[in-house]
Image (cartoon, rainbow, N blue to C red):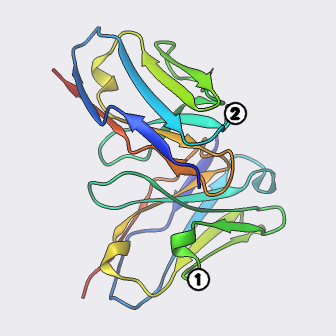
Amino acid sequence: DIQMTQSPSSLSASVGDRVTITCRASQDIRNDLGWYQQKPGKAPKRLIYAASSLQSGVPSRFSGSGSGTEFTLIISSLQPEDFATYYCLHHSTYPWTFGQGTKVEIK
Amino acid sequence: QVQLVQSGGEVKKPGASVKVSCKTSGYTFTSYGVSWVRQAPGQGLEWMGWISTYNGNTKYAQKLQGRVTMTTDTSTSTAYMELRSLTSDDTAVYYCGRGVLDYWGQGTLVTVSS
């Protein structure tokens, strides 16, 4: 099974900060990766698909990059509504696996 | 617009079974598979499996093999997830999602308690 190692597990940041979250895959997953945002009590929402494509309707301050085994989600200028937990998900082969999550909190 | 609407919360006793439904609309049901994901209280997301709405093929997480069955009803564009032999470790919010999880249902809380 492919393992997804996500870091950091949590971070504190201020409005306007640039935030970087990383996922590492234990094997090559090409670009079969998505990034999700989850707010308390809500279903996750996809932000990025195919590692770097922005989901329709998602603000352009979100961006994704990477391929193979190293992937990054960047929030270029953190907004109040971005405080949430973020997950990566690979769907390269079965079973799919999520990263452990990164909780983004207000500093 | 694409919508996935799940059935309501359930309370079950240990050893029982639960069946969660996921009614879809706004797209051609048989053009996308359906994935299932669960989230235990305070924990991360766990992929449970996927079903092809085209031919019914399934892929399940190893840890759930033998206890989970995913099915679909193409006449009503609805997917189902049944989990048997429930224990307290199965207490979680269960989500369905379209294909590679581009759209999600609202979640169904399943509580297993004696």
In this rendering, would A1 be left or right of A102? right
Instruction: Indicate whether B71 appears above or below A61.
Output: below
Residue A4, position in %: x, y?
A: 49, 43
Which one is nearer the viewer's eye here, A8 or A45? A8
Residue beneath the point at 57% across and 72% down? B81
Residue placed farthest to the right in the image? B55
Rendered image quadrant of residue A6: top left
Quarter holding residue B112:
bottom left
Categorize mark 2 by other alpha carbons within 10 Å: few (<14), some (14-19), many (20+). some
Q: Is residue A58 left or right of residue B29?
A: left
Q: Callout 1: helix, strand or loop? A: loop
Q: CA distance from mark 1 to mark 2?
A: 31 Å
Instruction: Say what amino acid the circle numbered 1 marks.
Output: Gly
Q: Which residue is mark 2?
A: A30
The reply, left or right, for residue B110 in relation to residue A94 is left
Q: From the viewer's perspective, tell me whether residue B17 is left or right of residue B99.
A: left
Question: Horizontal and vertical percent for residue A64?
Answer: 54, 21
Chain bearing mark 1: B
Furthest toward the front, the residue is: A26
Q: Is residue B20 visible?
A: no
Chain under numbered label 2:
A
Q: Which dot marks residue B66? A: 1
Could you say which is closer to the camera, residue A8 or residue B56? Answer: A8
Q: Is residue A61 visible?
A: yes
Asked if the residues shown at circle 1 and circle 2 are in contact, with their CB atoms under 8 angstroms apart, the answer is no
For image coordinates 34% across by 61% down, the residue present is B40
